[in-house]
Amino acid sequence: MFIIGCLLSFFIVFAPRVMLILAWLFSARWDMVWNGWFLPLLGIIVAPYTTIMYMLVWSPAGIAGWDWMWVFLGVLLDLMKWGQVAQNRNRIPGYTDPQTLAP
């Protein structure tokens, strides 16, 4: 049962990144939304949910109105994910936070 849980969490973490890489390789929309390679690559690594939401709501006229709600939801999901990573790091046995060590 432990292996199934690990595999499930692995796929949940990497599914947005795999979706973005497949969109980069096979979607014509990708070139319309992004004018370079640095910002989408940074989005894939650091903020995949925000990148997905931005790509889905983008239109040639721009993002307006309630479309920003979806981008904000992506930012919120990414912040929650990074907060969970930081919280889980403190639960590792034997881990000492470098910021709490006295000089």
Image (cartoon, grey):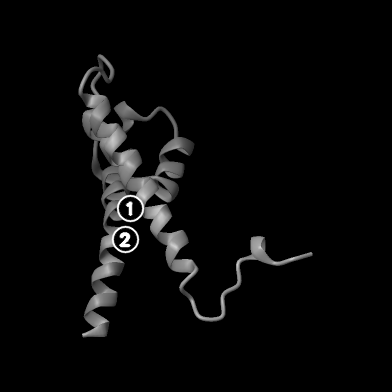
Left/right placement of residue 67 relative to residue 78 reads left
Circle on res. 7: none
Cα gap from disc 1 to disc 2, whole angstroms = 8 Å
The amino acid type, in three-letter code, at marker 2 is Val
Residue 93: x and y, percent? 51, 80
Left/right placement of residue 102 relative to residue 64 reads right
Q: Residue furthest bottom?
A: 1
Residue 35: x and y, percent? 41, 27
Q: Residues within 10 Å of mark 2 (few under 14, many from 20)?
A: few
Above-or-below relation of 1 to 13 = below
Secondary element under disc 2, as helix, strand or loop, is: helix
Residue 62: x and y, percent? 28, 17
What residue is shown with label 2?
A: 13
For the question of whether residue 27 can be seen, the reply is yes
The quadrant of the picture occupied by the N terminus is bottom left
Q: Nearer the viewer, mark 1 or mark 2?
A: 2
For the question of whether residue 54 can be seen, the reply is no
Give yes or no for contact between labels 1 and 2 (Cβ–Cβ under 8 Å).
yes
Circle on res. 17: 1
Above-or-below relation of 45 to 60 = below
The amino acid type, in three-letter code, at marker 1 is Arg
